[in-house]
Amino acid sequence: MSLEKVKTIILTLLVLLSLLLTWLIWNNQPNYDWLNLKDLDNIAIAKEKKVPGIILPDKLLYHEDNGTTGTVHDREISRVMNLLRTWTFDMSSSRLLSKKDLYNLMHGKNRIELDFPAPVPFSVYQSVLNFANKKVPDADFDHIVIELNKGTKNLNHVYFISTASNKVYEASTDQKSIQVFISKLNDNKTLYKPYTAFALSGPRSIYLPAGNPVVNQYKYATTDIEIDKFKKALFADPNFVKKVAGEYTNGISLLRTDESNKVLTFVNPGEDIGYSSDPNHLLTRAIDFINQHSGWTDQYQYFEINERENEVTFRLFKDGYPVFNDDGMAEIREYLGRTEIYKYVRPYFNLSLNLPLKPAVVKLPPAQDVIASLQENPSVQMNKVRDIAVGYRLQKDSDDILSLQPAWYYCYNGVWKMAGGMKMDWSKTKTIFILVFLVLDIYLSCQLYFKHVKNQYEVIGSPTAEQSLKAANITFVDLPKGKAKRPYISAEEKVFTAKDLKKLKNQQAEIVNGQKLSSVFDKPVKLGTKIKTDQLEAVIQENMLYGSRYKLWNYDKDLNQAVFYETYNGKMIFNNKNAKLTVYLNDRNEIISYDQTYLTNIKIYREEEETLSAVKAVEALYKKGTLKPNSKVTKAELGYYTRVPELQVLVPTWHFTVKHGNETEQLFINAFEGQVNEMENAQ
């Protein structure tokens, strides 16, 4: 027997063992006391959406006499679709065409071609377009082609085309509407770029951008969506919830989270998945399910449907380009059971803040290079390449920072892959899988053992913030009441000049690396026997640049230095090395020198939002394990903290001084998102 056969047998056995252990863990549940949770109806994760905002073309082509232009710009496609929604379509006939004739019809001159990423049932799109017919075809389409011959005497047809079945459904509409449409096509002509036809296999061809596509790249800060909201929205019986080993169950359904990628999986194993459903019913149910808990976060659009698996996928889009990620961070995937959801996989975060990024655009290789590389790849059969498109690769820069990098993608046998990926060595991959499943089986065995030995469980409740803190013996001074409204702000690091140095008197100052001012006084500045805050602040206002905009952070008697931070509208910019003033004293309490940095051109980056209340921020610190039980909060103030270390985008932040035993800590928490800012990462 060969080594590869032995590997295959071992891998198969390990996979089967992992499935068995998983089943035993799910079914080996101890008896629990249940807690009735009230007021769980009408859970809203984000927002509801209607079909016109979910099922959209992902490409628009304008075939003219002198060539083809096109766009994927989401606003332009929405504008065109809104124009079509004012028309009435009269379905007249259908016919079956050869592939060659089908593509000739789609790509002929003087017509608009709207390409959808997946088949769209006519019955679902009745809520988008107006059909004069009482009964629409029991079929689907993935392209709409509109003839655009000028003049009301010319009869222009509209074709709904299915490239899967080679079927064309012909419709007519008011010719005056088409003439108005033609006149409005040039309103956003700058959004249309030249497109070129490329042959794939046989008569099939695809239109792609000519030349090197230039695409924006993005960096985003993310905001987590509370898992509690999904727990309350998804369970079949929301009145009974328990938590076991980090997973949530009502005895029937299971919710688990991938905390690294912020992706959740909800499974309802009792639901029948082995049935056949028509695409109309499947797609309608998938949209309704997400609307039931207002689960449309960011710009997700209909992207794929698999009738055999009863599966529907909605993908994240940015600027009209699809976003891809191997860990499920850019898609909402549903598997529909006979009566309820069977499996639901989706991210539980929002792209909350678009961060400045340089360079802002990326120039991609031309489409012909991408196609040539696919044709030269021996593992790629061109007849299985279904589509090619520019998209975004979503990748993690840190726990809460994501970047969207432009790249070419191709759909191969129904699976989207990034062009230029490495060829898989299956023998090596098989060895890796054996090791992975071996470790997984050991882990699952340990989980099964601990569940059998220890019947520990956690019950989910909803105490108030004050109750949670009181139970942990956490006390606090009078905290600021209510919630405030604050904006994100942005700033630039000041570059000091010789002109700045001339403003300083009785001191010898120099500029270090352009952005730091270091100065020594000709004669030490006396402060007196006891250091006072108002005295220190008066000295810096009189002797240093922008002194009135700094506020004392702390005075360290042992180091003989005082640290000030810059303020914005009276609120301190915490722990920012680029907004810091450090004053040095001698043993006689005299100021002898200082180092200074400064943020300039501070402006509102995003409009005001409501912050967490102080008590809610304290509770969040406790729940995250940062604030220990038996602690006392002695000071609370709202200021600003750098949201991303390498960028000067500042977010409203709560600062708390906390005493725990003989120790004093300075804790910071994002006043919008509840994210803890660690001191060691401070700027």
Image: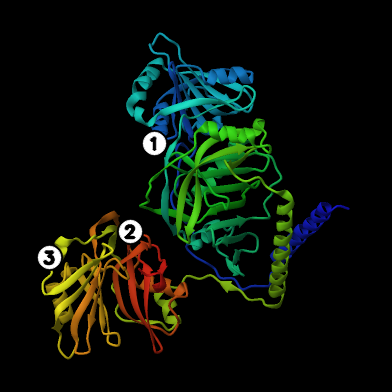
The secondary element bearing badge 3 is classed as helix
At 16% from the left and 77% from the top, the residue drawn is 521
Callout 2 secondary element? strand
Residue at 42 percent across and 40 percent down: it is 215
Tag 3: residue type? Lys
Q: Is residue 537 left or right of residue 151?
A: left
Name the residue tied to disc 2.
649
The percent position of residue 647, horizontal first and vertical second, equals 35, 58
Residues under labels 3 and 1: Cα distance? 53 Å
Label whose residue precedes the other's in the sequence (3 or 1)? 1
- Name the mark nearer the viewer: 2 or 3: 3
Spatial separation of the CA atoms under disc 2 and disc 3: 31 Å
Residue 358, which numbered label?
A: none
- The answer to whether marks 2 and 3 mark residues whose Cβ atoms lie closer than 8 Å is no
Q: Position of residue 164 (x, y in %)?
A: 63, 28
Q: Are marks 1 and 2 in contact (CB under 8 Å)?
A: no
Among numbered discs 1 and 2, the one appearing first in the sequence = 1
Query: Between residues 475 and 391, which one lies in front from this camera angle?
Result: 391
Q: Is residue 207 left or right of residue 71?
A: right
Residue 325: image x %, image y %? 54, 49
The 10 Å Cα crowd at callout 3, few under 14, some 14 to 19, many 20 or more, is few
Measured from the top left, where is residue 635 in percent x and y? Answer: 30, 79
Type of amino acid at the residue the image marks with label 2:
Val
Residue on which disc 3 sits:
502
Q: Amino acid at mark 1?
A: Arg
The nearer-to-camera label among 1 and 2 is: 2
**Is 539 on the left-hand or right-hand side of 383?**
left
SS for callout 1: helix
Whether residue 119 is visible to the viewer of this picture, yes or no, is: no
Residue labelled with disc 1: 75
**Structural distance between the alpha carbons of marks 1 and 2:** 28 Å
Q: Is residue 25 visible?
A: yes
